[in-house]
Amino acid sequence: MADKESFRDHISTVDKEGKRIWVFPKRPKGKLHNYRTLVSIFLLTILVVTPFIRIHGHPMLLLDVLERKFVIFGQPFWPQDFYLFVIATITIVVFVVLFTVVFGRVWCGWACPQTIFMEMIFRKIEFLIEGDARAQRALKLAPMSWNKFWKKSLKHSIFFIISFILGNVFLSYFIGTDRLFKIISEPVSQHLTGFFLMLLFTAVFYWVYAYFREQICTMICPYGRLQGVLLDKRSIVVAYDYLRGEPRGKIKRGDSREKGDCIDCKQCVEVCPTGIDIRNGTQLECVNCTACIDACNSVMDKIKKPRGLIRYDSEDGIREGSRLKLNGRMIGYSSVLLVLLIIFTFLFARRSDLDATVLRTPGVLYQELPDGWISNLYNIKVVNKTFDELPIRLKLVSPGGKLELVGNELVAPPGNLCETSFFVKLPRSAVMFRNTPITIAVISEGNELSRVRTSFLGPMNQKGKK
Ligand code: SF4
Ligand code: SF4
């Protein structure tokens, strides 16, 4: 038993001396790999195209952390929208947890940029230049020769160019494509910080995909590290059906011992990009890339056994011998995910272009005017969340009275705030209580952008003592 479980004492890519074991996975082929390729092309296209998309002249997505400027779907978000950021973060965390509990590491295998870049771009280039796993291993062990030199040089040059492109794509999400093109086209001395970031992003991508590779998933990625606590026996994972597969053994003529469907061909191990044997059970290193499912299915086809010895299933599903089907937990958790998304979409859509705060000027009571009217002095702060300058007009909606600005017209600069003071004057007949509720509309270019409710302080009246 101790031997069987010994794989859990170390990770598959580090030997007993703590040295890196380089993984040479076989080229994956099969139906799931084809689907993953299509999904990857779709996601890569979105990744590259998004920074160039403009909505009403503004980027579709910009996350300018340094200048605290965020644009999502062409809508500007300022530090005043921090509450949305908090709600989005909570939604994402809950989403990730619930999604993983039900669907395991589907994200890692199908949508994670690390897996897509590694398996769908860099690994494919490596297969193209150096050949399949066996040829790659032989080339690594071979002494330096012209053949080795040109293959390694070509591979690393292409890796560097792709890292440069990916680095720039990522950078454009943070500084925008306009600034990126300026860094590329203008003298370096004018954009030292941008140029440094460009080099840094390129170097990080190159290092990760040329050298560090799957170690990101097994040693660094926090999501990968969390799998141990997020997955349970009902989570869907890439799993080996040990009931059907064991006792494993090669097919030998004349061997009458009863055997399971696993012929111990190790094809599932040879295609694994993280170097594990999925027949040992669910492991931290498994990124659910499905390469072993494809490999085993093709073996099952050859030996005329049903497909699915390795498949997407839960531990309980394998133990009970039942096929994966929609259950109450999947429906329940998926419904919660849907509700979270609806709440966030609702808050996102409800977000106004402008925030107005009105407060009575501290330390100032009401004034009784000679014409019998009563006035209160207020301060207003208006936060403009749009890209445009907004001329602001204030209007007293209720009760009937007058609103007079102190000073010039109010103009809110883009992405900034402006403040001023104003008087509200009400006839004595409208002041029924000590605190009379009033409503003020904030209007710009004929559109009412916000309504603010506050109170109007007046003398005590025989009708009420509030
Ligand atoms: S590919 Fe399938 S048959 Fe071959 S060793 Fe893996 S599980 Fe067994
Ligand atoms: S065990 Fe299978 S699914 Fe998991 S990483 Fe290896 S090949 Fe991919």
Image (cartoon, rainbow, N blue to C red):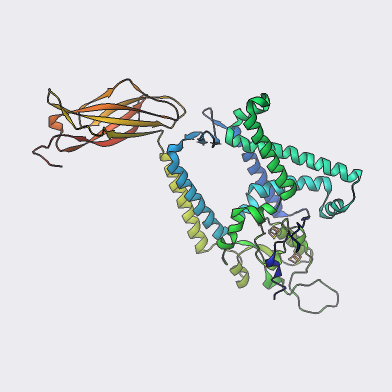
Farthest-out residue, left: 462
Rendered position, 53 above or below 241: above
Please indicate whether residue 29 sits to the left or right of residue 442 in the image: right
Place of residue 264 in the rendered image (x, y in percent of width and height, measured from the top left) = 78, 68
Q: Residue at x 62, y 32 (%)?
A: 193
Farthest-out residue, top: 408
Place of residue 7 in the rendered image (x, y in percent of width and height, measured from the top left) = 70, 67
> Depth check: 153 or 291 in front?
153
Q: Residue at x 23, y 28 (%)?
A: 424
> Depth check: 134 or 14 in front?
14
Q: Quadrant of the C terminus?
A: top left
Q: Quadrant of the N terminus?
A: bottom right
Rendered position, 37 above or below 162: below
Any part of residue 140 in sight: yes
Q: How many numbered badges does the structure rendering display?
A: 0
Place of residue 14 in the rendered image (x, y in percent of width and height, measured from the top left) = 73, 60
Place of residue 25 in the rendered image (x, y in percent of width and height, measured from the top left) = 77, 55
Please indicate whether residue 310 sits to the left or right of residue 384 in the image: right
Quarter location, residue 398: top left
Please indicate whether residue 203 sits to the left or right of residue 68 in the image: right
Quarter location, residue 427: top left
> Depth check: 465 or 427 in front?
465
Any part of residue 104 in sight: no
Quadrant where ligand 1 appears: bottom right
Rendered position, 165 above or below 241: above
> Depth check: 356 or 263 in front?
356
